[in-house]
Image: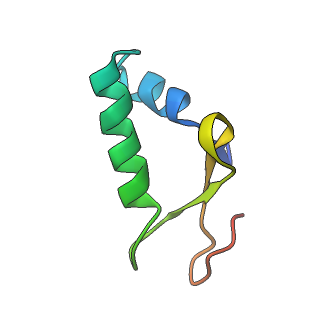
Amino acid sequence: EHHRSIIPQECRELLGWGESQSAKVEVSRYLKTWSSGTDAFLVPEGHGATRRYSLAVQGTENSI
């Protein structure tokens, strides 16, 4: 909520997982899960290296 959006690198830093390939893959899996399906609370924005994830507005697919 404080940052309004996050990139995968920031997510790894917050989790203390570092820059290993396995950490990158695991964070990608988490972000994909958190941004898809009926329980999604993140909205992906952009593609590739510029992709960010913003909090979804409850009840819609728009970001805050």
Determine the residue positioned at 38% across, 15% down. Answer: 18
Quadrant of image for the C terminus: bottom right
Seen at 40% across and 79% down, the residue is: 38
User: Residue 32 in the image: x percent, y percent?
Assistant: 41, 54
State the residue at coordinates (62%, 76%): 61
Residue 29 picture location, percent across and down: 33, 47
Of the pair 15 and 7, the residue shown nearer to us? 7
Query: Please, which residue is most extreme toward the front here?
Result: 48
Name the one closer to the observer, 10 or 50. Answer: 50
Q: Residue at x 32, y 26 (%)?
A: 23
Q: Is residue 2 visible?
A: no
Residue 45 visible from this viewpoint: yes
Choose top left, top right, bottom left or bottom right for residue 33.
Answer: bottom left
Q: Residue furthest bottom?
A: 59
**Residue 29 relative to residue 11: left or right:** left
Q: How many marks?
A: 0
| Image position, residue 25 (x, y; %) | 33, 34
Q: Is residue 55 above or below residue 25?
A: below
Figure colour scheme: rainbow
**64 vs 17: above or below:** below
Q: Give above or below for 53 relative to 34.
A: above
Q: Position of residue 28 (x, y in %)?
A: 40, 42
Q: Nearer the viewer, residue 34 or 46?
A: 46
Dividing the picture into quadrants, the one containing residue 12 is: top left
Q: Is residue 20 above or below residue 14?
A: above
Q: Nearer the viewer, residue 47 or 54?
A: 47
